[in-house]
Image (spheres, grey):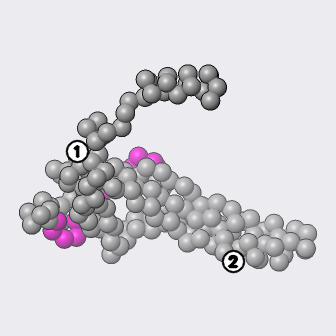
Amino acid sequence: MNKFAGFLLVLSLLILPTANAQNLDYNYQSTYSVPIKLSITENFSTKKPLNEGDILQFKTIEDVYVHNTKILEKGTPVSAKIETLITSGMNGFPDEIILNHFEIPGIKDSQLMDEYIKTGQNRCIWVYPLKWALTPVPPVGSFTNLIKGGHAQIKTDHVITIYYYPEWK
């Protein structure tokens, strides 16, 4: 090993903190989780004008228990933030919405695995073969660029499951 590589190794050991269970926010040794099933309070679609950061309202579908102790009742209100909004594009690419930062009374955000992704209808699977079939006819293949993907929808009968890790800090 050359001297410079050895110097970088020693420097990194001095500067970087050691990773042990005491200084991590999560207890990754514990895999015990409790599913929390949610439904949106009113039908939602990306057809409506939306912005990143908008808040959507949900409610719990059933009681939630941790070690036989009820922590949430059915119908408890829950809110979530639209983290990322991807609009549909050419050639059948769909709308996509990513929800995150679910706020549940009495549960810290650091104890949740709460990302939910909803995607609209992906039309690429039939648009691309059509595009390639029409390419020999000069302007016709380009018209498939105008085909857009589907809107993302979350309906009141959809079940969204996020996970609560009660043993994490």
Q: Residues within 10 Å of mark 1 (few under 14, many from 20)?
A: few
* Residue 14 place in picture, x, y as percent: 43, 23
Residue marked by disc 2: 126
* One can see residue 140 in this view: no
Name the kind of residue labelled 1 in the image: Lys
Nearest to the observer: residue 117 or residue 41: 117
Residue where numbered disc 1 is placed? 169
Work out which residue is located at the far front of the displayed protein and give it.
1
> Magenta span has 62?
yes
Look at label 2 and name its amino acid: Trp
**Residue 128 figure quarter:** bottom right
Residue range in magenta is 52-64
Direction from residue 107 to residue 8 in the image, left or right: right
Residue 91 rendering spot, x and y as whole percentages: 70, 66
State which quarter of the image contains the C terminus: top left
Measure the C-alpha gap from mark 2 to mark 1.
Answer: 47 Å
